[in-house]
Amino acid sequence: MKPHEIEVGKTYHNGKQEGRYRAWKVLGTDVEMIDLSTGNTRDDGVVFKFIYGPFNNYVGTLSLESFARLAEGKVVTDDQYIPARFPVEEGTYKCELCDKWATHYEYPIQDDPEFIYAACDEHWKEHDETNQGTL
Ligand SMILES: [Zn+2]
């Protein structure tokens, strides 16, 4: 995205699928930070919180330019449900709908952040076909 499109309070995502999906909520802009590549301070830092992904709830800082480069799109509203799907090792979770081992899970689930939804390949396929075009 363009640097001028990055706004405080909005959430941006990296446009990747499944386990590589990331989203970050911008907590502040024009923040003073140290640029490690030059060793100088700069005042266009973007402070953001990881919303989806392995660093969920961690806070990071990047220059506006670098953040804009990572951001592929804006999450339209903060409560929009965006499935973040992760692969799981066989034998970790059972499919919610049958007796097979789950291959992927989604987390967090809308309205229930503690819940991990896991399913087998066939049921993910069914799920995706049902939900196609609804997002
Ligand atoms: Zn299943």
Image: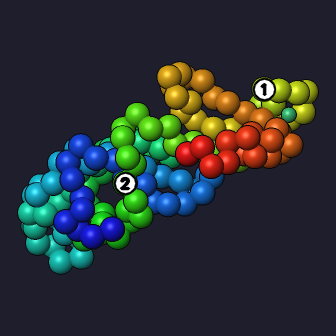
Q: Name the residue: 36% across, 38% down.
A: 78
Q: Examine the image and state in which quarter residue 85 appears.
A: top right
Secondary structure under the numbered disc 1 in the rendered image: loop
The residue sitting at the bottom extreme is 38
Q: Name the residue: 19% across, 66% down.
A: 4
Q: Position of residue 31 (x, y in %)?
A: 12, 55
**Residue 42 higher or lower than 123, as above or below:** below
Q: How many marks?
A: 2
Q: Quadrant of the N terminus?
A: bottom left
What is the crowding at mark 2: few (fewer than 14 residues within 10 Å), some, or many (at least 20)? many
Q: Which residue is mark 1?
A: 96
Horizontal placement of 121 versus 86: left or right? Answer: right
Task: Compute the Cα span from label 1 to label 2.
Answer: 31 Å
Q: Name the residue: 8% across, 63% down.
A: 43
Residue 105 or 62: which is nearer the viewer?
Answer: 105
Residue 131 or 110: which is nearer the viewer?
Answer: 131
Indicate how the structure is coloured in the image: rainbow
Q: Does residue 58 appear in the picture of this structure? A: no
Horizontal placement of 73 versus 60: left or right? Answer: right
Q: Position of residue 59 (x, y in %)?
A: 31, 45
Q: Type of residue at label 1?
A: Glu
Q: Position of residue 74 (x, y in %)?
A: 37, 54
Q: Type of residue at label 2?
A: Lys
Q: Are marks 1 and 2 in contact (CB under 8 Å)?
A: no
**Callout in the foreground (1, 2):** 2
Q: Which residue is mark 2?
A: 74
Q: Is mark 1 within 8 Å of ligand 1?
A: yes
First in sequence: mark 1 vs mark 2: 2
Q: Which mark is residue 37?
A: none
**Residue 99 higher or lower than 35, as above or below:** above
Q: Name the residue: 39% across, 48% down.
A: 75
Horizontal placement of 61 versus 96: left or right? Answer: left
